[in-house]
Image (cartoon, helix red, strand yellow):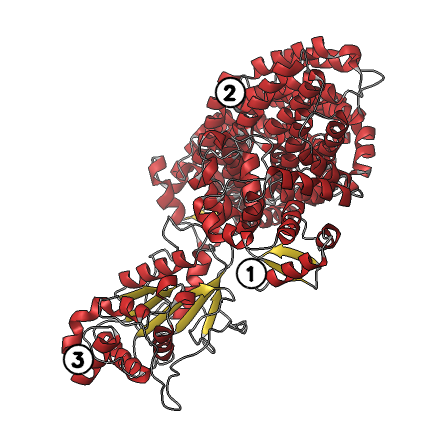
Amino acid sequence: MSPGARVEPLPPAPAGHLPSRRPRHRPAPAPHRAVPEPSSDTVWWDADGGPPPEVVGRARQLQEIRALLGPVTAAGRPLLLSGEPGVGKSVLLGEVARAMSGAGAHVLSAVGVRFEAELAYAGLHQLLSPLNDRFARMEDTHRKVLRSALGYGGAPVPDGTHVADSVLFLLRQLATEKPVFLVVDDLTWLDLASSAVLGFVARRPAGSRIGFLAASRSGAETFFEGAGLARYEVPPLDRDAAVELLGARFPGLAAPVRDRVLAQAQGNPLALVELPVALSGPQCGAPADPPDVLPLSPRVRSLHASRVAGLPAASRRLLLLLALDDTGDPGVLRAGSEDPKALAALAAAEPDRLITVDGANRRVSFRHPLMKAAVIGTSTLTERCQAHRALADMRADTPERRAWHLGRATLVPDERVAALLEEAGRRAARRGDATAAVATFTRAAELSPRPADRGRRLARAAHLGADAAGDLRAASDLLDRARRADLTGSPLAAATAALLLLNGGDGDLDMAHRVLVEAIETGAHGYDAGDEALVEALHVLLLVCWAGGRDDLWEPFHAALDRLKPAPPALLSACVRMLADPARTGSTGRRELDSVLARIRNEEDPGRIVRAGTFSVHPDRLAELRNVSWRVIRQGRGGGHVRRHLDALMHLCGQDFPGGRWEEAATLAAEGLRICEERQYPFFSWYFAYHQALLAAVRGHAEESRSLADRITHWAVPRGALGAVALADHARVLAELGTGDYESAYRHAVAISPAGRLAPYALSCCMDLVEAALRTRRTAEAEAHVSAMREAGLAALSPRLALLVAGSAALVAPEDRAVGFFEEALAVPGAERWPFDLARIRLAYGERLRRMRFVTEARAQLVAAAEVFERLGARPWADRTAAELRATRRSRTGATHGSVTLTAQEQEIAALAASGMTNKQIGERLHLSPRTVGTHLYQLFPKLGIASRAALRDALASLSPGAAF
């Protein structure tokens, strides 16, 4: 404000003109308005249509605001933004203003200020001060009105209507040069006089290029008359955007505290930024058990704490109960109130926007996420302990919540409370709430009087932190505390150390294997199969052995398994049979598998769900786990068990690829890689890269597939992860089969498993080895591999393996028996569930039928295969099938060059040679020797009247139309 501005009300206005004084009003909820499609008339946003890189999670909101405002060059559309404090209204205003300015508009802005709310035209002064030099160009009447209203000179303050007219005249004059855009923040604190003028201007954009955008808190009273104007409620950030914002501002924030902040902030950007601010120092690593009180920044205290402090003590106690209970149950307020006046005082707090009562859903909640933090942060330790004790008494019917509140109310070691917390931690772990489980076991350890109990409970918390919560730093700290307490030879501590080695260290499998084996052999007293810690350590050792891919790693595992009394748990036993040597022992685990899968639909423990999925891969029973696997993924996306989230993604990828759901597989693989990076699980990232390599191979992106496979190998070899190397070779096999480099395909196939042997990683690619062997004229090796499949009874393990075994047998069979094997493959029940495998068999069947001169029958198989390959996007196989179909047409019509007719085989050899293939490659494609191919070409050249391969393409182009392909 200028020194000459006066604090005085506007004089009364004549009837029908702008009111001179109007009470603040609370705006009614705006009717639902469909957001129009963004106009392309004028691009006032970034070229890619998205927000600037520093704005997180607001792309959709910015585009919707753009659509509501309309193009810059058109008549302006007024828009009012509303939202809770801290939701990001000011950021959106700033970005819209920046974009409008960049598009050529003249942007004028003002911000409502609390201490200026009683100063007449204070807001208008902010808005118009950049235009002071234009006043001299206005007519005397308008110039005098504006100068007087803004406090320049000593003239009386003019009538409000005259001020509004003069402002509108000035803005329209400015808009003749370029569009004008008015931006007003904190409309709540805009003075009455300015509010009246801007309300007048906002309703008269017709025929001008004046836009108007203002923001205020939801439900706040203002002097601005906004009835009838378009409104837009700014929502909180979604979880993904909230995680991104937290990660950008607080990259070192530990997972438990991060999850606590996410839950408490509820997507409010200010809360996300302010709540962890006091944790950016030594506590950034964060205890695994985050405290009730997240330290309040000065800004939060100034915004909310003073409002809480003004309530009576009894009302503050009820708010504290509501905040610590965190369920929204209104019964907490009734049960916690001994003074009826306290409830009345709390009811009076609702209009002050501290709490909101949802009568329909019977829930009470804080209107703003930071209000809850302020309630807890301004309480004393004694008050919080008393509140937790009262809540524990109220929650006697919910053991987990009762144990948690007792743990918070207890300040000295107490084994009774510690035992209740330990059981609550087990319950939380079984339902997949890893963060709660880690916090609960940690608190149980802190309240444990005996060092041995304290060490055991800390070891459990550390293992969950490393395996489930993805917080390796906190897990390492907890493990150190457990060892200092009393943890000699603990298998669970070894399992945690192994996971930390795999993910947080250099990923050395041999070191992890030694740590586990030593702990199991020295700490497994009696080898009790009911010892949860021992069984968990064996499951981790199982993972290490499978990833290691060497027989010597399995020996100590099997020795420990044989010692378990009275018998190994069914889940562990079945996993071993299906992973260690599935070709030999898989069929014996089918009864255990049936028993586990019969109960899986109602299973809540994500650990049991994903372990059931692990031994369902080779028997092709993952489809029965699809729904529960998605449940685990949804839990993981919501902050649940990270490792189980990754496991479930692995299983769905493993089901989606053979099942032909390649788009979903690509999406889930990308999600898995992102989680591995964000949550510090590098050891598991190779598996998702493997699926990306598979998809690239079958889609014809051979170089991309090879690059991904090489990255996996370069990571895996130094760490001894030979299982990962084998699966990388599987991707290479498919890539080389797609390009027609059958020699390389065979080399990679036998690297996974020599011909005639069925290594654990070779079952799903058994037909690939057979095809590559035949294409390179290694008939004996192909037949040996098929014999090994039959002797192992592989077809009995799963329908998909039955399909691959029958298809492989058909490939090696002589012509008089091949048709029977092909028909056997096509008749496998549910064969259509594996469309890529089935289409490859149909392609091979069609090739064989064509060579046998059954052209019509060949075309039927080839057409069916082509449809599948095209639908899947399997480009190399689609092209190969199309070439076979063209060959069947040539087989019917023949082709002529002058008076010479070419046979179908001659045409095909000529076409392949013209494409640049060598004699060896043509022979591999057509099952001919290179010498035979050379003989055909030698005979072809004179027929076509050419002397070299270079002339083949032109010669073939001159064939008669009936032979065109």
Circle nearer the N terminus (3, 1): 3
Specify few, some or many for label 1: CA neighbours under 10 Å numbering under 14, 14-19, or 20 or more: some
Q: Earlier in the sequence, mark 2 or mark 1?
A: 1
**Residue farthest along the bottom direction in this orientation:** 15
Look at the image and tell me in which quarter the N terminus lies: bottom left
Q: Amino acid at mark 3?
A: Met
Alpha carbon separation for disc pair 3 and 1? 46 Å
Asked if marks 2 and 1 touch (Cβ < 8 Å), the reply is: no
Element marked by disc 2:
loop
> Image quarter for residue 61?
bottom left
Q: Which residue is mark 3?
A: 138
User: Which residue in the structure is indicated by mark 2?
Assistant: 505
Q: Is residue 928 visible?
A: no
Which amino acid, mark 2? Answer: Gly
Q: Left or right: 67 with respect to 207?
A: right
Of circles 3 and 2, the one toward us is 3
**Residue lying at 30% horizontally and 71% vertically, measured from the top left:** 124
Which badge, 3 or 2, is on the more N-terminal residue? 3
Could you classify mark 3 by the number of other residues whose Cα lies within 10 Å: few (under 14), some (14-19), or many (20 or more)?
Answer: some
Q: Nearer the viewer, residue 527 or 589?
A: 527
Marks 3, 1: nearer the viewer? 1
Q: Which residue is mark 1?
A: 353
